[in-house]
Amino acid sequence: MKKLERSFYNKSALVLAKDLLGKYLVFNTDSERLVGKIVETEAYMGFNDKAAHTYNGRRTPRTEAMYGEEGHAYVYLIYGMYNCFNVVAAEKEIAQAVLIRGLEPIEGLEAMSLNRFNKPYEKLKGSQIIALTNGPGKLCQALGITRDINGEDLTGNRLYICSVKEVSFDIVETKRIGIDYAEEARDFLWRFYIKDNKFVSVP
DNA sequence: ACTCGGATGACCT
DNA sequence: GGTCATCCGAGTA
């Protein structure tokens, strides 16, 4: 486990989205450490991407983190009740990000289970184990990620991403989810996931 | 295994 | 006032 440094994030969201697959997302809460392997991502390419919050240079208080330095968190509220966690890519003023859509639970399963279903891990049914972290809103709930970590530096000690001993896997490239409004951009193959992994939201 | 609708609030026109 | 990078429970099969 080696924490990724700033330079790792200094690249196009399209490249970063693929590079993040297989890495470990670590969140240190007050009492424990929660870890999940990143198994599904989407690239949001900013200025020229009709699906991106920062399309055509749109800049609001909400999206400010996407315009900031690479290697920080962008967390926003969706549908009034869920959070989505993104990793800011590229560089300052180039507003690109990678949405994390699926995690495989690695460490802190008990806490994730309580956060999601308010019951211990051993009481979960098989389908609930998958549902712990197989979606962008679900994984935020499982880890306890909310908007108060928006803008957090991912090279710090609270929330960061690690490389681990490489295990080879196949990457599937497909269309992004939930962006039917984005005209031609809806068909771009900018979603990536680890083939055959159980924690992919939409296989 | 599915489809369908409700929840719920920030954001933007 | 409409939209939305979602999830879950209820209903049907």
Image: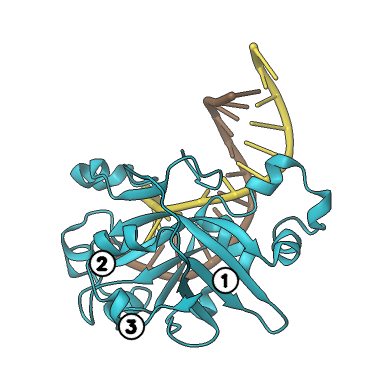
Chain colours: A cyan, B brown, C yellow
* Front in this rendered view, residue A53 or A149: A149
Please name the amino acid that badge 2 sits on.
Thr
Which residue sits furthest bottom?
A156
Q: To which residue does mark 2 refer?
A: A54
Where residue A65 appears, as percent x and y from the top left, is 35, 78
Which residue is at a point 22% across and 66% down the rendered structure image? A12
* Front in this rendered view, residue A47 or A9: A9
Please name the amino acid that badge 3 sits on.
Arg
Q: To which residue does mark 3 refer?
A: A6
- Quarter of the image where one finds residue A128: top right
Q: Is residue A60 visible?
A: no
Label 2, secondary structure: give it. loop
Q: Mark 2 touching mark 1, by CB under 8 A?
A: no
Label 1, secondary structure: give it. loop
How far apart are the alpha carbons under marks 3 and 2? 22 Å
Q: Is A109 drawn above or below residue A160 in the view shown?
A: above
Q: Chain of mark 3?
A: A
Which residue is at a point 70% across and 78% down the rendered structure image? A32
Mark found first going from the N terminus, 3 or 2: 3
- Residue depth check, mark 1 versus mark 3: number of the one nearer the observer: 3
Label 3, secondary structure: give it. helix
Please name the amino acid that badge 1 sits on.
Ile
